[in-house]
Amino acid sequence: MTILETIRRGTDYLAERGVESPRLQVELLLAHVLKLPRLKLYLQFDRVLTVAEIDILRDLVRRRGQREPLQHLTGSVSFLGHEIRVSKDVLVPRPETEALAQLAQSRLKAILRDRPPGSGPVRCLDFGTGSGCLIIALAAACPEAEFHALDRSPAALDVARGNAAAQPQPTAIHFHLGDGFSALVPGLQFDLIVSNPPYIPTAEVETLDPEVKDHDPRMALDGGADGLDFYRRLAAESAAWLPPSGWMLVELGDGQAADATRLFAERQWQIESVEKDLSDGERVLIVRRPGSGTASI
């Protein structure tokens, strides 16, 4: 069977099972099996696959038809150019979260630029790090800062540690296991806190696509009855871990910008802005510690 014939058969199989973009999915799986860039498949449509290659691909396509995530089948996903290993223990990084990472990179660079000489290290915390994609992207952009990552899942922290160590130019990251700020050394201060918290309302989790509800860890999805539990927690607890000039950037779920902004405003946080992602959705809330005064990002 040739590459083109295989693509056509796999596309039909996935389309019958309701998988979105079935041809692209098959091409990505085949590229993974053959260890080729996907576009190079188009230069080899007449290539005949070996029996072993067909068997491996057939199993992957079958599993994809059962709605196992593509990223679990290939084992990784690209996040701002960083190869991030994923598994059932961590949320698969979404393109929307790249908006949070890029905004956080810009803010961290500005903090480093404005830091007076001799005033100590600039520290950044990723609250709920999961796969580690956010803190890895920040460490790559600003290696001169000090980086910390916190998660309540031991399995997720193992994935994040592995991802950090596997980067071409790894930066030291301090990993902390625990349910919230109590896992940190008392008195530690961060100039920037970033978070992509669970924000799906509990009742909506079961309505998500099978790739998400059946394969992403529930604790990385479920944000409580209204989806806002972790925003309440961050608004209430984070200020003690930030200096007067400290910043926080958090990812927002669809339609949550007004409610999340209100929760922080009620705790006297300075609301800097709500930034949109590439799909024009209100995706990132940027705030400063209560009492920090007026500033512009």
Image (cartoon, rainbow, N blue to C red):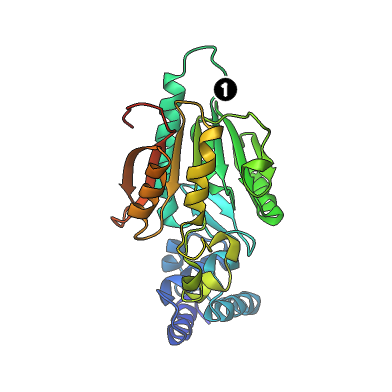
According to the picture, the residue beneath numbered tag 1 turns out to be 121
* Residue at the extreme top: 118
Residue at the image point whose x is 52% and y is 69% from the top = 212
Nearer to me, 200 or 96: 200
Please indicate, yes or no, whether residue 8 appears anywhere in the rendered image: yes
Local secondary structure at mark 1: loop
**Residue at the spot 41% in from the left edge and 33% down from the top edge:** 107
Residue 20 screen position, x and y as percent: 41, 75
User: Does residue 136 appear in the picture of this structure?
Assistant: no
Provide residue 181's location: percent of width, then percent of height.
62, 42
Q: Is residue 207 above or below residue 230?
A: below
Q: Nearer the viewer, residue 296 or 113?
A: 296
149 lies left or right of 200: right
Amino acid marked by disc 1: Pro
Q: Determine the residue located farthest toward the front in the rendered image.
A: 266
Could you say where residue 84 lies in the image, as x and y percent from the top left? Answer: 57, 52
**Left or right, 125 with reference to 22:** right
* Left or right of 278, for residue 105: right
